[in-house]
Image (cartoon, rainbow, N blue to C red):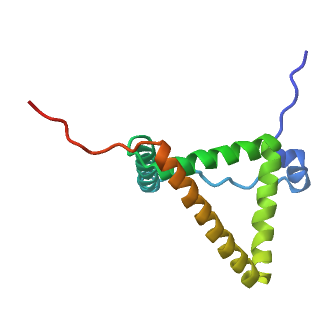
Amino acid sequence: MAEPRRCSVHLALGGGAVADIPPPPLPSLELSEEIVVKAADEMRVWVNYALSIAHDIAIGGNLRLFGQLAISLWVISIIGSFFNFLTLVYIGVLLCLSLPVLYDKNQDMIDEKLNAACKVAQIQFHIIEEKLQHYIPLPTNKEKKIQ
């Protein structure tokens, strides 16, 4: 069995057959050490920030942040169960392109409605927080007796 003939894309598209010219040179793809070090430093800052938030949630006892995280993950899982990943990305792109235009046209009305919704949400959050504080005992910072 004969091996298939291989040729470059340049030749396959007829670029070399017309005037016998070589394909254009490809630029070298290299990253300098300085760029890699800058990227690593920036990434380190973001990872440390994310780890400090995770520490506050897991060990710090920040109940409000823990509740926000739990509700956010629950909402994301509900939305994710309705859509395929690519569909969700497509909808996200459409929203990113169309929402700024709609906001510019109706900025005053949207700001008014969002402020009203934010006030209602804060009232409801405080009501729920007061109810939960009775059921969940918060740890006290009493020092242990040392003998």
User: Which residue appears at 81% of the width and 69% of the height?
Assistant: 98
Q: Residue furthest top?
A: 1
Residue 30 appears in the rendering: no
- Is 17 left or right of 103, judged from the image as shown? right
Above or below, 113 against 123 in this view is below
Image quarter of the C terminus: top left
Give the x, y percent position of residue 31: 51, 52
User: Which residue appears at 69% of the width and 79% of the height?
Assistant: 111
Give the x, y percent position of residue 109: 76, 81
User: Which residue appears at 41% of the width and 42% of the height?
Assistant: 137
- Is 43 left or right of 123, judged from the image as shown? left
Q: Residue furthest left?
A: 147
Image quarter of the N terminus: top right
Give the x, y percent position of residue 39: 47, 54
Q: How many marks?
A: 0
Above or below, 8 against 109 in this view is above
User: Which residue appears at 65% of the width and 67% of the height?
Assistant: 120
107 or 64, nearer to the observer: 64
58 or 29, nearer to the observer: 58
Give the x, y percent position of residue 92: 76, 57
Residue 51 appears in the rendering: yes
- Is 114 left or right of 56, judged from the image as shown? right
146 or 52, nearer to the observer: 146
